[in-house]
């Protein structure tokens, strides 16, 4: 129940910041914030981004950090 409240709170903040909810980066950023809040000792590029890439179904030879970072960066810049 508390996790659901955190998810809703993060979603509300992202919407207030003007990040478009229909972008993949919105979903990835939401998931990244929640995962980091649970375990803030994670390294973003070495641990968090690969976890997110796997969670979102990306199994490629590209850098997992790039696959996750690009949609997040695009959503923020919109």
Image (spheres, rainbow, N blue to C red):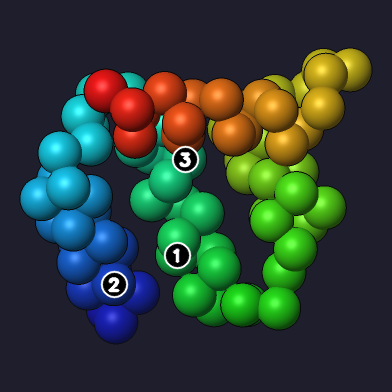
Residue at image x 38%, y 51%?
A: 30
Instruction: Pick the residue in front: 46 or 77.
Output: 77
Circle number at residue 6: 2
Residue 18 coordinates in the image, percent (x, y): 15, 39
In the drawing, what numbered circle is on residue 72?
A: none
Quarter that holds the C terminus: top left
Disc marking residue 34: 1
As drawn, 76 above or below 32: above
Q: Can residue 51 be seen in this view?
A: no
Please tell me the numbered disc located at residue 28. Answer: 3
Helix, strand or loop status at disc 2: helix
Q: In which quarter of the image is residue 42?
A: bottom right
Residue 70 is drawn in which quadrant? top right
Q: Are dots 3 and 2 in contact, CB under 8 Å?
A: no
Quadrant of the image for the N terminus? bottom left
Q: Is mark 1 on a helix, strand or loop?
A: helix
Cα–Cα span, label 1 and label 3: 10 Å
Q: Quadrant of residue 65?
A: top right
Q: In this view, does 11 lie above or below 60?
A: below
Where disc 3 sits, the SS reads: helix
Furthest residue toward top: 61
In the depicted view, which residue is nearer to us: 21 or 77?
Answer: 77
Residue at 29 percent across and 72 percent down: it is 6
């Amino acid at each position: 129940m508390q996790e659901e409240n955190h998810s809703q709170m993060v979603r509300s903040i992202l919407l207030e910041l003007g990040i478009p909810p229909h972008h993949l980066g919105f979903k990835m950023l939401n998931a990244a914030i929640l995962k980091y809040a649970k375990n803030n000792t994670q390294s973003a590029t070495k641990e968090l981004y690969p976890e997110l890439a796997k969670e979102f179904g990306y199994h490629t030879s590209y850098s997992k950090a790039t696959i996750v970072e690009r949609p997040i960066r695009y959503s923020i810049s919109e």
